[in-house]
Image (tube, rainbow, N blue to C red):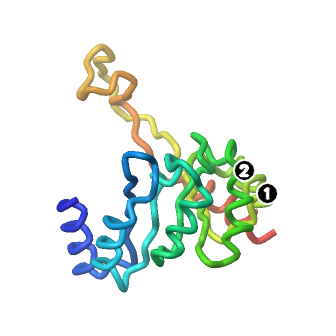
Amino acid sequence: LEIMKKDIRIAKSLGADGVVIGMLTRDGKIDVEICKSLINLARPMSITFHRAFDLCDNPFEGMETLINLGVDRILTSGQKNKAEDGLTLLSELVKIADNRIIIMPGSGINETNFPKIMNHCKAKEYHVSCRTEIESKMIFRREDVKMGSFPNYNEYTHKQNDLLKLKSIIHAINH
């Protein structure tokens, strides 16, 4: 908690527009007291509640709690691994929120599934991924040696934002 508070103070001192927070109680409720203290510390910055929301026990009750706390938006996949699989709940949340809070679908949204998700959810904001994997220019490779503890991590690629994917999403929004 102290690290979160320190991070908020740093973001604020650097002039950030907003911060992302999220804390649940052991029984899956929004932790009102901790969230309230983080929100009070962060204001006037914008507040987004992160995907901890996808682990809360009752998304409708959780949304109302966050509205009452004054949170600006909720980043959610509709309590599924990927937003595309949570379309029913995402649509319900957007409708019930009725502009009292922004529901921001996110997780696995890309240029391929964005039009479907946008047309189904009717949200105002989306958290999308426009990354592509870039192959390393390394010629010599030791494929059997890993430089970290992630067994499936590829030392010879990296992720990079892809402008064409972003343009595809912008095109879907405008048409």
Distance from disc 1 to disc 2, alpha carbons, whole Å, reads: 7 Å
The label number, if any, that marks residue 87 in the structure image? 2
- Residue type at the position of mark 1: His
The crowding category of the residue bearing disc 2, from other C-alpha atoms within 10 Å (few below 14, some 14 to 19, many at least 20), is many
Q: Report the side of 87 relative to 126 (left or right).
A: right
| Frontmost residue, 159 versus 9 | 9
Which image quadrant: the C terminus? Answer: bottom right
| Frontmost residue, 108 versus 39 | 39
Residue at the spot x=44%, y=59% of the render?
30
Q: Quadrant of residue 139?
A: top left
Residue at the spot x=53%, y=70% of the render?
73
Secondary structure beneath dot 2 equals helix
Which image quadrant: the N terminus? Answer: bottom left
- Residue type at the position of mark 2: Leu
Q: Report the side of 54 relative to 137 (left or right).
A: right
Secondary structure beneath dot 1 equals helix
Instruction: Identify the residue at the far front of this view.
Output: 27
Residue at the spot x=23%, y=27% of the render?
147
Q: Are marks 1 and 2 in contact (CB under 8 Å)?
A: yes
| Residue at image mark 1 | 120
Measured from the top left, where is residue 107 in percent x and y? 56, 48
